Image (cartoon, rainbow, N blue to C red):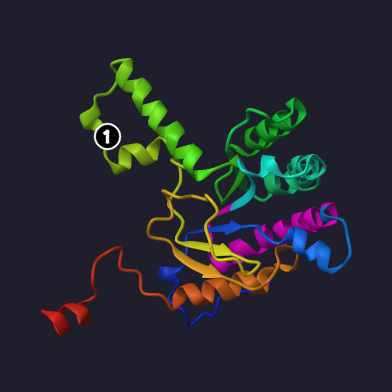
Amino acid sequence: MATVDQEQPQAHAPLHVAIVMDGNGRWAKRRGLPRSLGHRAGVESLKRTVAAAPDLNVRWLTVFGFSTENWSRPAAEVSELMALPKRYFESDLARLERDGVRVRVLGRREGLSADLVKMLDEAERRTAHNDKFFLQIAFNYGGQADIVEAARKFAAEVAAGRASPGDLDEAAFAAHLSTGAGPAPDLVIRPSGEQRLSNFLLWESAYSEFVFQDVLWPDYGAEHLEAAIDEFYKRERRYGGAVADDVLATG
């Protein structure tokens, strides 16, 4: 399995990588196949990527599977997308549980079928004790909706007398997001050639590095993840500040 170049400074490895799994439909169209087969091929890419990530020093992986806006797609495609998490967990949940992977599903359960909600809950329950690797699947998720929900939660606490408006700062607000239990993503990757966030981790990615790759998601694998991480190593993260050389040059 691929590993990061050992000459790279491992102290700066991306702890948390987030990926927009994009390009399934175009992959299928180029092959004259139904879009459903593109989505199914995308599940195999997810398996490869989850397997590769720990060897590349990644400890948290968040993937975007279905957005709150995807409900507007044709009913047959929505139905196929709804089946993907079930297909993934039916084939891989036992391995994830055995390998120490903790699964969290971000997004709204409302609107999902009862059997899908049961499967998502089971995946979280069966892996809740694991801590070697953290896999977050954003499903029926939207960054704006998540921010609104976090605001509602805090407002409810204020109304109940458990908090006051003055208690709210960036850290307190982030704790109310569905991702509040984990670190912000160091690296956000979007394959397929598109260069936009598409309502993914809007708050959390404020200081993430972005890498856009010209590969469709069903073709994605360890070598593409490694290439994105290699690009991450070339970046100089400033978090709004300046490095010493800049200060000396302009001071």
Does the rendering let one see residue 177? no
Residue 236 in the image: state x and y as whole percent. Answer: 36, 74
Total number of numbered discs in the rendering: 1
Left or right: 179 as drawn, with respect to 151: right
Q: Quadrant of residue 170?
A: top left
Judge whether 149 appears above or below 5 on screen: above
Q: Residues within 10 Å of mark 1 (few under 14, many from 20)?
A: few
Left or right: 187 as drawn, with respect to 106: left
User: Which quarter of the image is occupied by the C terminus?
Assistant: bottom left
For label 1, the SS is loop
Left or right: 242 as drawn, with respect to 137: left
Residue 76 in the image: state x and y as whole percent. Answer: 82, 42
Judge whether 181 appears above or below 29 on screen: above
Q: Name the chief secondary structure element in magenta.
A: helix
Residue occupied by mark 1: 168
Bounds of the magenta segment: 36-62
Residue 25 in the image: state x and y as whole percent. Answer: 76, 58
Q: Residue at x 52, y 80 (%)?
A: 6
Q: Residue at x 44, y 61 (%)?
A: 186
Q: Is residue 41 magenta?
A: yes
Amino acid at circle 1: Leu
User: Which quarter of the image is occupied by the N terminus?
Assistant: bottom right
